[in-house]
Amino acid sequence: MAEVMQAADGTPLKRSLARALRRQKLRALALIAPLLLFVLITFIVPIASMLFRSVENDIVANTLPYTVEALADWDATGTDLPPEQVYEAMFYDMFLASEAKRHTRLGTRLNYETTGMSSLFRQSGRNMDDIADLSYEPLEDLDDAWDDGETWYALFNTRGVSDATLLNDQRTRVARLSGTAADAEINFAPDAEVSALLPLAAREYTAWAVFVATQNNRDPAERDPWESVAPALVTDLQRADLSGYVGPAADMLRAAQQADLPVPDFAQEFGAMDEDWASLEPWQTIQTHSGTYTSGYFLNAIDAQKTPEGVAWQPEEKQILLTLFGRTIWMSLLITFSCIALGYPIAWLLANLPMRQANVLLILVLLPFWTSLLVRTSAWKVMLQQQGVINDVLVWIGLVADDGRLIMINNQFGTIVAMTHILLPFMILPMYSVMQTIPPSYLRAAKSLGATNWTAFWRVYFPQSVPGIGAGSILVFILSIGYYITPEIVGGTKGVFISNRIAFHISSSLNWGLAAALGTILLAAVLVLYWAYDKIVGIDNVKLG
Amino acid sequence: MKLTKTLLATTALTLASGTAFADSHMASDMTLVSWGGAYQNSQQKAYVEPYLEMNPGVTAVWDESSAEAVAKLRAMNEAGSITWDVVDVVAADAIRLCDEGLALEIDPDEDLAAAPDGTSASDDFGDLLVSDCFIPQIVYSTTFGYRTDLVGDTPPTEVCAVFDTETYPGKRSLEKRPINNMEWALLCDGVAKDDVYDVLATDEGQQQALDKLATIKDDVIWWSAGADTPQLLADGEVIMGSTYNGRLFAAIEEQDQPIGMLWDAQVFDLDGWIIPAGLSPEREARARDFIKFATDTQRLADQAKYISYGPARASSAPLVGQHADLGIDMAPHMPTDPDNAANTFLYNYEFWADYRDDIDAKFQAWLAQ
């Protein structure tokens, strides 16, 4: 029977060892914790949140909650316009959104999908008051008291039993619309009896009360509600049974019901406001893009789009992004190979020259590294342009005619030359550090055993330098695939990369969703290539030094 | 003990000096955002320096981020910390910032100074108040310059010379975006000025404009920075090219380059201030106070001493004087000068807000073909 080995203090040795190891691991973790946290907070989290935008799409449902609900049953592929209740829902959604100044934001979002939505929303937001006035003014003419905020407050405020569900729903509605919390204390709660009797008006009044109380810090008891409560009230009165109602404003309500005030014909009013509302397109766009998450940005990123009928390609004259992806990868490969071709001999020289000369050469390699990227790129402009140094020299020595100067910039050639130059040090340095570790005696041994110069190089030296080439290639390729400023300056129209489009969508068109989708695809492409490299060459074969 | 006392005393002194002069309800420092270069310099000279002189204790810092102002403001807003107080943007960006709720709405008659003769600010700025959030400063134009020594004996007088590669062989530079280029292409393809945007709103019209541009596609160098065209003209890389009129003025008058101005069909655009939404009350008060001063009649007229952009107020125009260093009359170099403005084109903000993404995608795809 084997005895359990024990440490000096009597605990089993195994457990004691495990504890010591764990302590060591914790200490190691504590030591790298600052770096880990730093990377996590400043790098991983922002990138992840940026990439998340590529699928995020809650703005439509947050801004137009009732419209999205009402549109759900509508057949977008048919030829019929949505029914009246969709227009009605749109009116109340749009009214609140325009008071919160959120409708234009949604217009911008939907304009990425359908041209014209931006101004449609901006202008419609301005006209919501006019539609509401169609009911508000007759109501006011009937009884001046309707013009008084106190009447409304007394009518809807709780008299004992309040409708907590309604209040919470409207808090959520306002919070989601405005993107800020709406749970502050409110001097108002909807009365359960009235909200059962006049559901739409109670809903709109509560939404207003929540909005002014939480967003504007005003007391709803002292303010006049928005005009949108009037059409809501008139609509409710058409079907409300007031016979048992004895609460505040009972007589006024009965009078209004008897007067049979007009409910706006929302579909007609929207159509009169802008004929686009009487067409299928805006409704199709809203319905197609109403999901909280969307694949639309990713589809856009590969020149496709979501339509009511399903996924379809973009019209041919708008297809550009796949071309750019292909071009980015193709040109990055080209740049990587030119870096290998130019860098290999230099790295070999660096590794084999005597120390003194090698140091001077190394400084020459590093010198461009210390010069601003913009300066180097602009210098290439001076060199390569048609009235530039190279063309001038060629004309001077008579190689080309003055009217036949070469076009070497604002095209792919310019981008490849400038980027090869800029990325060359990233290729040379890993190659150099690998070549330094290859003993010269191997080559001598190969030759003494009868190998020719070429065989000795190709069979003995080159295989040992491959890890340097691999490391340099990965560095150069990954850097160039995301390059932005050099292609922008010297690339003209055919030498620009996908990153130039990403930059455009980040800073100019503000279509961050599309930019994020493009960025995610680019990241995925790099990871796939890295994986392929690992499979074919093996990542163990990469040495940075 | 001693150290603590010194520290306390210093803190107290700093606090006292910081607030001694400035109004207590206004922040004492501002971050102004502009474009850098000669334009920012004109703002510094014409109204920032006088404002700081009038308000001792106030400091102003520049941030040269106007080109990315919309994206950055949106990011700041999402992060919940706005670090800018007053931002200089072009009108199209102001409209977008207003749409996104990122800029404060301004009541011109309440928040801005009236003209010296009592004309209200809203009348003085007139049509140039293109957005509820936008306070215009200057009118600039995108127009063409040409090399006087490379165009032969008949210098171009109208914009369609750009499309006439027979009379004017050589390269041209155009901005690498559809805005302005599409309009010029249609104008030179026989579309009447009033119909341009109606035509451009259709697929056929967009194709028509691209087809017209295609006739010179091989002769065009596309620029993305305002400094490109002056450089290309100076190097003789192009014989004519579009850019901002102030850049051409600098190349002609300040650097003596053989360049002529082709004012025909220049496209007017506006540049001005916005105040970001979500500032603290003190900072907002300071920003409003600054804006009111910086956009009054005299200040806008003063700016024209340093740069050839037209003041946005009607009442400033008669006060435009001479260039501060060159001593030349500035009025004839203003895009709004009657001789230069014989045939002008007004940028249609609403149209481009709707069609920018759509046409830009087509334009870029066309460029890549």
Image (cartoon, coloured by chain):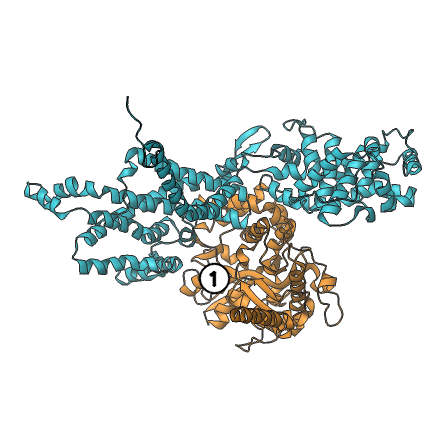
Q: Is residue A505 visible?
A: yes
- Give whichever of B211, B127 is nearer the camera: B127
What is the chain identity of the residue bearing mark 1?
Answer: B
Q: Is A480 situated left or right of B360 in this image? A: left
The colour one sees for chain A in the rendered image is cyan
Residue at disc 1, secondary structure = loop
**Image coords of residue B323 (percent x, y):** 56, 75
Q: Can residue A496 be seen in this view?
A: no
**Image coords of residue A49 (percent x, y):** 52, 42
Residue drawn at x 28%, y 59% is: A394
- The chain whose colour is orange is B
Label 1 Cα crowd, 10 Å radius (few <14 / some 14-19 / many 20+): some
Q: Is B223 situated left or right of A545 in this image? A: right
What residue does disc 1 label? B227
**Image coords of residue A204 (percent x, y):** 77, 39
Residue drawn at x 55%, y 58% is: B66
